[in-house]
Image: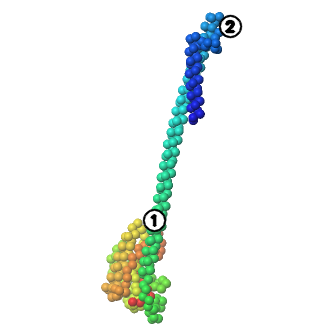
Amino acid sequence: MDKWMSATAQRRAALAALAVCAGLAAGTGCKNGAFQPPPGATTSTGSAALPQQNQALAAQLQDLNRRVAQLDLNNADLHRQLAQKAQQETAAQEQVKLLQSQLQSTAQSYKDSQLAQQQAQQKVTALEASTHFRGGASISANSSVKQSLAAVSIPGLDIRQDGEVIRIEVPADKLFSTGSSQIVSNGQRILDEVAAAIVRSYPRQRIVIEGHTDDSFAANPAAAHALAGQQAQAVFSQLVERGRLPARQLSVLAMGDNYPLASNATPAGKAKNRRIEIVVYPDSL
């Protein structure tokens, strides 16, 4: 760019010199110069040649003026392009800074989510551990959970052994009105049978009443746990007040939709997941 501007200055100087020479030629001519008539030429012939020379110089001057004007335009256009490039470079730098900031924010959010996940897992682990009572007492042969499994039978209920515990699964639809914790009359009969089985086969075992829901509250986990807790608490009250089970033998745990038994993609799967599980632990009171 500096070299190009220097060339422009040189052209302007040449144009100025040409203009001065043209003026001299129009007046008195260039002494001993190119415009002096040759020896032997008549004065009239020299006078006739001067206008032609002036016209040629004027044409050259006009052409140089046109070129200089074009160079000025080119120079202005180059300056405009340089300004645009500078603006684009500044905008690109700002965009890079913005992307770097967003990347740092995303990385921090990822770390926070990982930490939250770890903390949630620790809470779940602690909660699961809290449901495994540590009575430390051994179970005699006539009160063994494994031996009692075959003896416990309640029509219409799924009773299964899960490791060291017995799970009595009661469909929530048989106990409660839809979406509520209000026990229906048929549900009271079922729980009376459950209470009688506990008194008969597990009179000294720790028992946890787990409330489970389907994924209808997926957008509001707190509501799922609230309903699960309310239903488990209603079963607790039924077993204590009507079944005459000692309150110290029972505990309540709201599981929400965390432990489905079937896929929630079908109505049958949802119904399977809506349940109360009465879990009998081997620990004695």
Residue named by callout 1? 112
Establish if 96 lies above or below 46.
below
Q: Residue at x 53, y 38 (%)?
A: 81
Mark 1 vs mark 2: give the one in front: 2
Q: Is residue 108 above or below residue 13?
A: below
Secondary element type, mark 1: helix
Residue 226 horizontal side relative to residue 145, left or right: left
Q: Would you say the residues marked 1 and 2 are in contact, meaning their CB atoms lie under 8 Å apart?
A: no
Quadrant where the image shows the C terminus: bottom left
What's the residue at 42%, 80% (across, down)? Answer: 130
To which residue does mark 2 refer? Answer: 39
Q: Residue 216 is drawn in which quadrant?
A: bottom left
Number of other residues with Cα within 10 Å of mark 2, as a class: few under 14, some 14 to 19, many 20 or more: few
Q: Which comes before the other along the chain, label 1 or label 2?
A: 2
Element on which disc 2 rests: loop
Q: Please say whether residue 24 is visible from this viewpoint.
A: yes
Q: Position of residue 254 (x, y in %)?
A: 39, 76
- Residue at 60% from the left image edge and 11% from the top image edge: 50
